[in-house]
Image (cartoon, rainbow, N blue to C red):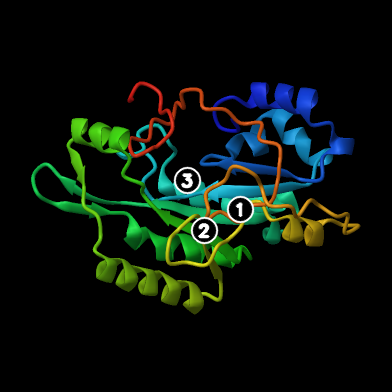
Amino acid sequence: MVACFPDELVRVLAEKCPPEQTHTLVIWTKNPLNLLTHEPLSKIRHHYLLFIHFTITGMGGTTLEPNAPPFDKMLELLGPLVDYVGEPARIRVRFDPIVHLLLSEGKKFSNVDSFESVVAVAQRHGIRNFSISWMSAYKKVTARLHRHGFSDAPLSPEEWQKEFSRLSDTAAGHSVTLHGCCVPGMPVSRCIDGDLLTALHPEKEPCSTRKAKGQRETCGCTESLDIGWYNPCPHGCIYCYANPAHLS
């Protein structure tokens, strides 16, 4: 919504989320540029407290994320985004998903090696929290990957543990916290965390801490009002479990 439908987001906020009735606006985005440059949308910071989940996978502009912005351009937005929301604690970077794929010519591909670069840049801007998850190989995802010359190359349990240990060591080396988003084998975490949003509120106004209904067992999110949608997404990420435009 931020990257591709900013005017619609402004309209939905006006209709469904009056500022006086909204504790915090939590946004997921792969491209937050419109928060900084789109005049109507950029003004929401004057009316709402914001918490941003900024997804940076290292694959922007590649075949896997054909219409997402390039990796380096998104890293350049981390500093301005911290200034926009007011403090780095209001941003969590999502290195999500981690993919392991086999190309048609037999070569392996993974974005996991980009993780340390993302952490290093974000940490320099004071961002201390990161979410990770691995690609879910739903049938429609594997079929779409196959049509584009890829196949899923899942890790064995032993390989996954080794990779998770490597990511954990990288996070610890940069003094940041790693959260798993519905990842078996990692502690249950919250992308929407009522306790955290309460602590970040200038007057400590309580946010709901009741568990969100209808979520996966490994999801610890607290309740919220979802104003997103699953209309076709112009980013067109071919590993997406939702509805990438022109690629389903």
Q: Earlier in the sequence, mark 1 or mark 2?
A: 2
Image quadrant occupied by the N terminus: top right
Closest to the camera, between mark 1 and mark 2, is: 1
Element type where label 3 sits in the image: helix
Amino acid residing under circle 1: Cys
Q: Mark 1 points at which residue?
A: 191
Q: Earlier in the sequence, mark 2 or mark 3?
A: 3
Closest to the camera, between mark 1 and mark 3, is: 1
Give the distance between the C-alpha atoms of the residues marked 1 and 2, in whole angstroms.
Answer: 8 Å
Give the distance between the C-alpha atoms of the residues marked 1 and 3, in whole angstroms.
Answer: 24 Å
Residue drawn at (69%, 49%), measured in percent from left and top? Answer: 51
Label 1 CA crowd tier, 10 Å (few <14, some 14–19, many 20+): many
| CB within 8 Å, label 1 to label 2 | yes
Quarter location, residue 13: top right
Q: Mark 3 points at which residue?
A: 73
Q: Earlier in the sequence, mark 1 or mark 3?
A: 3
Q: Name the residue under label 2.
A: 131
Amino acid residing under circle 3: Lys
